[in-house]
Amino acid sequence: MTKLIDGKIVAKEILDNLADEVLFLNKKPCLAVIIVGNDSASKIYVNLKKKKALELGFNSIVIELPEKTLEKDLIDKIEELNSDKNVNAILVQMPLPKHINPLKIIETISPQKDVDCFHPYNVGNISIGKKSYVYPCTPKGIIRLLEYYDIKIEGKHAVVIGRSNIVGRPLSQMLINENATVTLCHSKTKNLSEITKTADILISAVGKPNLVTENMVKDGVVIIDVGMNRLENGKLCGDVDFENVKDKASYITPVPGGVGPMTICSLMVNTYDLFKYQNSL
Ligand code: NAD
């Protein structure tokens, strides 16, 4: 029988436990978020992060900078936060205005405060299987979901579709570190369905509704759908044709309510992990 992987329940359990731990701290973890410009979606994400941090009893700083902010001034601001002992975690909301080089900005954030885990130092550690201060939020959330439902990763063939720096690539590395055999597919992959049919665990992070259909998966597959697509009727859906695929799967995530809640949950856990590291707890 197919089991639904419920990210809302898992995230709530993790965050409830985290809030309990924070209650007993003398100092509070602090997450600083910088947003440059007026992108409305970015503003919503930043507010959600602030709300969640405050709910957990964290301190939250949001720094809003104008669209025309110079790259140098943003770098100065990050360096100020890097040396501020009251700030444990720094996040620069992406995308940035075109005149600012995002890689330069990511490289400016101290790896010990890099809550998104985008810094090449942290990414590099993960790719060589070394322990990192933090792990990228969405991949970390996916691994937590698999662990929560006692889904064995070791020895399994995990097929990841999508090679972005925030999901597909780091997730592939983390699955390798968990001893999976990993195939990473992308837009230039030939015979996608031949590969997906061999997956024990199939993870799609593309952003295309109905990319994964019933005839592309084998019986008993575990399906993690990262895709978030807004349909014309306003409904949110993933990359997987959920209704037709679900009966073949042993486990499957819904969209919404699967991976989504785990991403913000991981951001909060990362903030706490950085706080603990900096305070030698
Ligand atoms: P992206 O847009 O940066 O890249 C998409 C990837 O899909 C690329 O690597 C590309 O090679 C691959 N691709 C495109 N067409 C393909 C095809 N036909 N076959 C195979 N591969 C193909 O990706 P992203 O930022 O990782 O986002 C992917 C999706 O995941 C989006 O829908 C996004 O909204 C969603 N997302 C959700 C969460 C969450 O928390 N639920 C977090 C991050 C991203």
Image: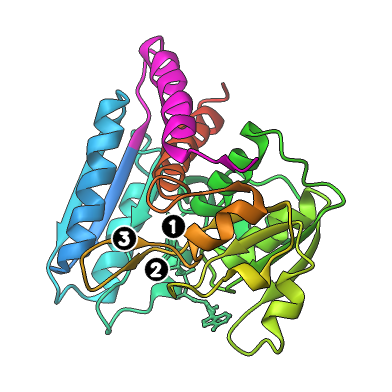
Callout 1, which amino acid?
Ile
Distance Cα–Cα, label 2 vs label 1? 7 Å
* Neighbourhood count class around disc 3 (C-alpha, 10 Å): few under 14, some 14–19, many 20 upward: some
Identify the mark at residue 109; answer none if there is no mark: 1
**Residue 101 x, y percent position in the rendering:** 37, 79
**In front of the other: 199 or 189:** 199
Quarter of the rendering containing residue 158: bottom right
Asked whether residue 21 is drawn in magenta, I would say yes
Callout 3, which amino acid?
Leu
**In front of the other: 233 or 225:** 233
Q: Which residue is drawn at 24% across and 45% down?
A: 48
**In front of the other: 17 or 62:** 17
Q: Residue at x 52, y 49 (%)?
A: 253
Residue 194 sits above or below residue 179 on the image: below
Residue 259 sits above or below residue 50 on the image: below
Q: Magenta segment range?
A: 1-30
The residue wearing badge 2 is: 105
The residue wearing badge 3 is: 236
Q: Taking 181 as reference, is 43 left or right?
A: left
Q: Is mark 3 within 8 Å of ligand 1?
A: no
* Neighbourhood count class around disc 1 (C-alpha, 10 Å): few under 14, some 14–19, many 20 upward: many
Distance Cα–Cα, label 2 vs label 3? 32 Å
Quadrant containing the N terminus in the rendered view:
top right
State which tag comes first along the sequence, 3 or 1: 1
Q: Does the residue labelled 2 lie within 8 Å of ligand 1?
A: no
Asked whether residue 165 is drawn in magenta, I would say no
